[in-house]
Amino acid sequence: MPAPPRRLPRWRDLEPFLKTRPWHADAVERRLARCVTVDDVERLARRRVPGAVFDYVHSGAESEVSLARNRDAFADVELRPTAWDAVGDPDTSTTLLGRPAAAPIVLAPTGYSRLSHHTGERAVAAAAAYAGMPYTLSTYGTTSIGDVAEAAPTGRNWFQFYVMRDRAVTDQHLAEAREHGYEAVMITIDTTVTGLKRKDLRNGFAIPPQLTLRTFADMARHPGWVANILTTEPLRFATFPAGSPYGLWGMSNQHREQRLRPSDVTTIKEQFGGPVVVKGVLSLSDAVRSVDAGADAIVLSNHGGRQLDRSPVPLELLPQVVDAVGDRAEVYLDSGVRSGADVVAALALGARAVLIGRPYLYGLMVGGQRGVDRVLEILTSEMERTMSLVGVSRVDELRPEHVRLRRS
């Protein structure tokens, strides 16, 4: 067959190849615009903060077996589409604790958020409110209960707390959360003592950061981060009064209640007068006892692999817990969620919603609130695309037949 005749290209032939991406004058916007996945955001985050800060967020407990297994479980998921029911414009909205949410995603409690970016919890709460998702302030947050409420006055703010041996401290937290209009409280039950993260120990991680020769050299490579920390409000555990022994670094094990009981859930629900979520459930019996005690929702969680290493993987535990208590309480899941496809898999296996922590902290490191906004955009768009390809138009249409754990 003879070759087609050659000719000189014309401008209209070249024009389609010369289109460029929109250029952003702002450096943060340029960085975030290049991020397509949470992994992209994580890679940028590693360069934005000192190594000890990144390791605190990124690492897991002990040998990090649970950390790896959480991700392995999601990687092992097979999504099963129904092509004849393909959907072009799926709806990710749902209800959580009886109120609407734009997507079945809750921003989990994370301590020390102002280490990731000086705007800290304020930025995260504002991003969650803008996206229409609940945000959970940690007991060990670096912004106060009142300041978070002021930063996100229209947000669905939840407060996570640890029961303290001195119940007056817990009572004060509950009263303050109620006073500032927090919608729900979340009691964490898997942290009577703190798991050991070896990287933190080797890095000498502390609040406030301790200056050693090694940490000084590390911080010197991040002058912007240092300047922001030094020129904004002092870094402290802001949910406790200034000077309180409960706000001292390294003292949490001595102050937290070491013997929690299901009756604590009942008491807290009566005291707070609103929904109570129990986080850190890792057995069928704890799920049943939590719901029997009055929990409105439970979170299957191994703390993102940061507490007991070699603990059960929440995704693998999910179906049996949903079968046992899913008709009496909402069942949430965290630990290992990194994409919208992960969210879809968890919902198909029966979860009402997922919690995310590390992903939004990476976004915070890269660009403050704009970074968190970008992470939530990524997760939502991935979720919409996955739902379309699976063939469902609403999250409540996701069923176990849409997913399989390949090793099961």
Image (cartoon, helix red, strand yellow):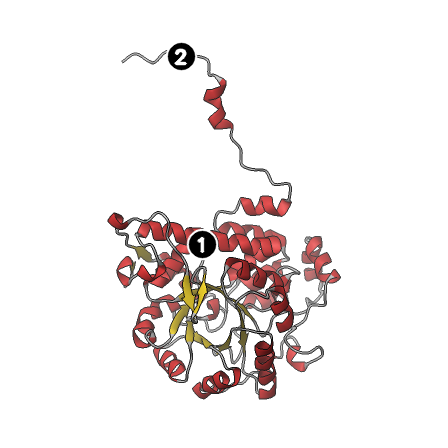
Q: Is residue 212 left or right of residue 136?
A: right
Q: Nearer the viewer, mark 2 or mark 1?
A: 1
Residue drawn where x is 45% and y is 54% of the image: 380
Which residue is label 2 attached to? 6
Does dot 2 land on a helix, a strand or a loop? Answer: loop
Q: Earlier in the sequence, mark 2 or mark 1?
A: 2
Residue drawn where x is 59% and y is 57% of the image: 364
The x, y position of residue 115, in whole percent, is 64, 63
The x, y position of residue 25, in whole percent, is 64, 41
In space, the residues marked 2 and 1 are separated at their CA atoms by: 47 Å
Q: Residue 105 occupies which quadrant of the picture?
A: bottom left
Image position of 321 with respect to 293: above or below: above
The reply to whether residue 338 is in sight is yes
The x, y position of residue 300, in whole percent, is 41, 71
Q: Nearer the viewer, residue 172 or 138?
A: 172
The reply to whether residue 65 is in sight is no
Residue drawn where x is 48% and y is 83% of the image: 269
Q: Residue 121 occupies which quadrant of the picture?
A: bottom right
